[in-house]
Image (tube, rainbow, N blue to C red):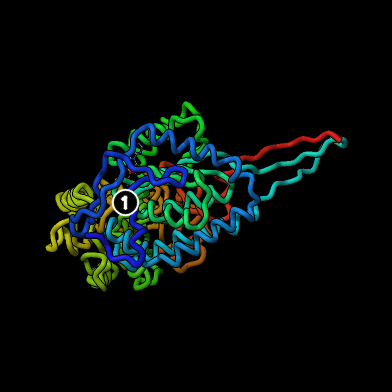
Amino acid sequence: ARPQLTDSQLIREDALIANQWCKAERRFPVHNPATGALLAEVSNLDTSHAQEAIAAAQDALPAWSGLTGKERAAVLRKWFDLIVANADDLAAIMTAEQGKPLTEAKGEVLYGASFVEWFAEEAKRVSGDVLASTWVDKRTMVLKQPIGVCAAITPWNFPLAMITRKVAPALAAGCTIVIKPAEQTPLSALALAELAMRAGMPAGVLNVITGDAEQSIVLGRVLCGSSVVRHLSFTGSTPVGRILMQQCAPTLKKLALELGGHAPFIVFDDADVDAAVEGALQSKFRNAGQTCVCTNRFYVHTSVYEEFLAKFAVAIKKVVVGDGTQPGVRQGPLIDQQAISKVNAHVGDAIERGARLISGGKAHEKGGLFFEPTIVADVHHEMLVMREETFGPLAAVMPFTSEEEVIAAANDTDFGLAAYFYARDIGRVWRVAEKLEYGMVGVNTGLIANEVTPFGGVKQSGLGREGSKYGMDEYLEQKYVCLAL
Ligand code: ADP
């Protein structure tokens, strides 16, 4: 049931510690969510392996951080080239373990690779600073130095890009890292590690430890509790982010957290409604609605409300559901049964409280983990779907009348990751962009992320920014040096 690859060596089932494949007695299964088929049985590590991986990263640190940025850039650049050269195989592995359509998977591979390229370039540009001194006989400077051994815990919804977005800046800065990928999708991480070795990554610089749901908690505890690990970067749910933050408190680790979102998508009366519908499709149904920047709440001005709904109902027919390897499929399966239950619960609750079903609304006739692309209208803020992240293919649409009212509604949440709005009035565009309490705002577009721009949230959506010229600072310490003449 394995995907057909050009290079079958890219499927790895063991963890990577100090450039050695580390085989554990205990295994855990990885399934294809589209078919239920068994894909691989991966090493299920325990505490001692996690400690070995941390030690390997610690051993590798002096030599790696002692290289020049330009030398580290050369290795990263080779890794980038290999990821791009193997993009089709990596996409096939990702679709097999995660379910997203092949074209989306390929898109993620290239998006993930772009962080490696970007930070390879940035590695050469980590410069300190000389500050104007207030002492005639002293000179004051700031050095930037790698923070040390880092850890990354990553989710299943972007099995590859969430790794490179953390690992590339860390390695570029001169840090070494231990990665713990999600138990649902370890194969993409291990394929990346294989390519890193082929690129000449020195032993211990990049380590991958794997475990099932239960062991992930154990491995996470070791990473958080270690005083060698100086930085933890996590992408995942807000509740787990809180747990990890607590576990990192005793060692006062620096933390980067990319957590849940609850993105609003506002269509004002001066919006281009056709463009808004296209943006709505992209923002809502990408990865079957399983991204932290996916729209969860649509607010549409009453004057264009019925027009938007009618056009959205037509457009949603383009979202063909099926196995992601099949041509034309735009929405794959959800990741597991729990995901299906959550979407079902949100739809059921909305309908029970008076929402109008426009399209879909139930498990797809294909069975398994497929769900119909769904639109419900006339929702209100008492409904679950307007209070918490659905993480599935459910679009909930609510009418509004005034700008003040919709801004207040959009900000009425503990989350603050991405927000979107469609409007043409330039004054309104500026006003609303300023007032939305979110880390990222898309204006007249539903797609905003790339390697050049800072990704991250405010409020309980997280801490820190990934990507962009700011992304490397996360992995650097500033050292002030005062030199008396
Ligand atoms: P999701 O809801 O998207 O599955 P989670 O936050 O549960 O997100 O998982 C994201 C990552 O965090 C995965 O790699 C998972 O194994 C890991 N994880 C989940 N719970 C814990 C925990 N208690 N301690 C450490 N890691 C955890």
Quarter the N terminus occupies: bottom left
Q: Single out the residue that lies furthest toward the top.
A: 250
Which secondary structure, mark 1? loop
* Residue annotated with mark 1: 185
**Residue at image point 37% right, 62% down:** 90
Where is residue 461, by image quadrant?
A: top left
Say what amino acid the circle numbered 1 marks. Answer: Thr
Quarter the C terminus occupies: top right
**Residue at image point 31% right, 43% down:** 43
**Residue at image point 56% right, 41% down:** 61
Residue 69 horizontal side relative to residue 117, left or right: right
Q: Position of residue 97 (x, y in %)?
A: 28, 56
Q: Is the residue marked by circle 1 packed among few (<14), some (14-19), or many (20+) residues within 10 Å?
A: many
Q: Height in image: 312 above or below 290?
A: below
Q: Is residue 235 visible?
A: no
Nearer to us in this view, 7 or 132: 7
Nearer to us in this view, 202 or 218: 202
Q: Height in image: 61 above or below 39?
A: above
Q: Is residue 467 visible?
A: yes
Q: Height in image: 27 above or below 311?
A: above
Q: Position of residue 327 (x, y in %)?
A: 26, 73
Residue 121 horizontal side relative to residue 321, left or right: right
Nearer to us in this view, 369 or 116: 116
Q: Position of residue 352 (x, y in %)?
A: 14, 50
Q: Disc count in the image?
A: 1
Ligand 1 falls in which quarter? Answer: top left
Does any atom of ligand 1 lie closer than 8 Å to the CB of label 1? Answer: no
**Residue at image point 47% right, 43% down:** 18
Q: Position of residue 167 (x, y in %)?
A: 49, 49
